Amino acid sequence: MKKDLVLDDLRKAKQELADKSDEELEEEHQSSILFKRIVNVLVASFLVLLMLSFLYLGSPVYSYIFGLAGSSRIDDFNTVVFRNEVIVSFDDETLFFLQELYNPLGDERAVCLLGEVKGNEYFVEGYYKPRVFERAWNYVSHAPCSDDTIIMLHTHPFKRCAPSSTDKNTLRNTKFVNPNIIMLVMCGAERFSAVID
């Protein structure tokens, strides 16, 4: 039955071609060529722009784009979901403190978040600022968070959400002592990215 339907479709297509004049066929062919040329020009232009942006703007543009893509905004219930697997909920006081602390143009800040972990859900109910050794606009060096910390948080400049290799290494080393801990990077008053693994 399926074979008969295919044969019928082929017969109809053959008949439609036979019914068309040579001018109509030539016009369709020219339209197809024009469409392919337009698509090729658009794709080539995009690739050239991509290469030029990489050469002239450098990798910060890409880290900016990928950082934003990998981050999440906090919702109206003070909750952030990361990769559909980790949920972080803030109490009002802690979130207000973090939003006041965040300076999009200033140096990085560090905060240790306290609370409760239930499976993949982190309920933040308190905070403290660790002793800071050194900080600048692109890094912060601080004393380790205590063993009862559930989240290490530090700020990044506005919309620079991608965690650094140092961030990932710090979390990896901390997990030896505190396996449930995660790291958040705050890159806006309402935007966070997570370092989970």
Image: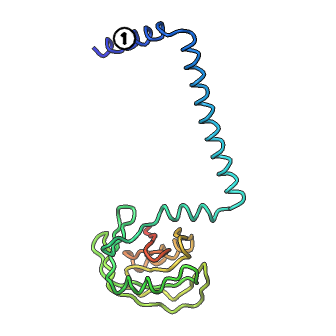
Residue 124 lies in what quarter of the image? bottom left
Q: What quarter of the picture does the N terminus occupy? A: top left
Looking at this rendering, what residue extends furthest in the right direction?
56
x and y percentages locating residue 63 in the rendered image: 58, 64
Where disc 1 sits, the SS reads helix
Residue 16, compared with residue 154, is above or below; it is above
Of 26 and 13, nearer the camera is 26
Is 127 left, or right, of 167 in this rendering? left
Mark 1 residue crowding within 10 angstroms, few (<14) / some (14–19) / many (20+): few
Q: Nearer the viewer, residue 48 or 179?
A: 48
Query: Image point 42% across, 67% down: which residue?
Result: 72
Q: Would you say 80 lies left or right of 107 here?
A: left
Q: Position of residue 41 (x, y in %)?
A: 65, 38
Above or below, 101 relative to 67? below
Q: Which residue is mark 1?
A: 7
In the image, residue 130 above or below residue 72 = below
Residue 134 % position (x, y): 60, 88
The residue drawn where x is 68% and y is 47% is 48
Count of labels shown? 1
Q: Is residue 83 left or right of residue 53?
A: left
Nearest the eye: 57 or 118: 57
Q: Amino acid at mark 1?
A: Leu
Q: Residue furthest bottom?
A: 131
Image quadrant where one finds the C terminus: bottom left
Which color scheme is applied? Answer: rainbow
Q: Residue 119's image quarter?
A: bottom left
Rendered location of residue 30, percent (x, y): 60, 22
- 98 with respect to 135 (left or right): left
